[in-house]
């Protein structure tokens, strides 16, 4: 892996922001929670990040199912933040594997590295896993989206 040397003076511009110091190398946020579950049930995950300079932090979470929790915060460096999420049996009737990706940033928009956990949500015990029910639920979801689009015109 290449090694880079950075030389800076006080108040030099990094990431479009003024710094009084050179930022330390960002670390990885932590995410803990269930590694498996049932579609349609809500699960809680704990996220935290120790900023190298102790700055307040924000979190962004990609849940792996097309939904993203945009930057949320600020939180104190090291504070544990709880997030709840569920994987829809309508969108994923058979279940499957999902990658949850978490990233943190500080007050100066310095990004952490990304942390990723792979989870499995089982759909076989879900009512939506039944082919007829699944088709009906998809039809209803599409119909509701059509109605919403008509109302918003």
Image (tube, grey):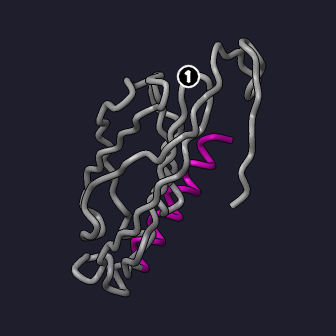
Q: Residue at x 33, y 43 (%)?
A: 83
Question: Quick one: 41 or 136, which is closer to the camera?
Answer: 41
How far across and how far down the image is residue 85, in percent? 34, 52
Q: The N terminus lies in which quarter of the figure?
A: bottom right
How far across and how far down the image is residue 66, in percent? 53, 59
Using residue 133 as the reference point, say whether residue 6 is left or right of it.
right
Magenta residue span: 135-153
Q: Residue at x 61, y 23 (%)?
A: 108
How far across and how far down the image is residue 78, in percent? 34, 32
Q: Residue at x 30, y 47 (%)?
A: 84
Q: Is residue 85 above or below residue 13?
A: below
Q: Secondary structure at mark 1?
A: loop
- Number of callouts in the render? 1
Mark 1 neighbour density, 10 Å: few (under 14) some (14–19) many (20 or more): some
Question: Quick one: 78 or 89, which is closer to the camera?
Answer: 78
Question: Quick one: 116 or 148, which is closer to the camera?
Answer: 116
Q: Is residue 131 above or below residue 147?
A: below
What predominant SS class does the magenta segment belong to? Answer: helix
How far across and how far down the image is residue 59, in percent? 47, 38
Using residue 104 as the reference point, say whether residue 35 is left or right of it.
left
Q: The C terminus lies in which quarter of the figure?
A: top right
Question: Any magenta on residue 152?
Answer: yes
Q: Is residue 144 above or below residue 151?
A: below
Seen as rendered, the residue at the extreme bottom is: 131
Question: Any magenta on residue 99?
Answer: no
Dividing the picture into quadrants, the one containing residue 50 is top left
Using residue 118 as the reference point, say whether residue 40 is left or right of it.
left
Q: Which residue is mark 1?
A: 107
Q: Residue at x 53, y 64 (%)?
A: 142
């Amino acid at each position: 892996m290449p090694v880079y040397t950075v030389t800076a003076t006080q108040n030099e511009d990094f990431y479009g922001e003024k710094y009084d110091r050179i930022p330390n190398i960002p670390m990885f946020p932590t995410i803990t929670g269930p590694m498996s579950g049932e579609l349609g049930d809500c699960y809680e995950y704990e996220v935290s990040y120790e900023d190298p300079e102790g700055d307040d932090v924000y979190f962004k979470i990609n849940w792996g199912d097309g939904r993203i929790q945009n930057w949320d915060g600020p939180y104190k460096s090291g504070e544990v933040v709880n997030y709840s999420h569920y994987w829809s049996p309508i969108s994923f009737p058979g279940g499957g594997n999902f990658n949850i990706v978490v990233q943190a940033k500080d007050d100066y928009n310095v990004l952490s590295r990304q942390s990723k956990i792979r989870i499995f949500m089982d759909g076989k015990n879900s009512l939506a896993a039944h082919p007829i029910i699944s088709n009906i639920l998809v039809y209803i979801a599409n119909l509701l989206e059509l109605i919403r689009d008509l109302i918003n015109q």
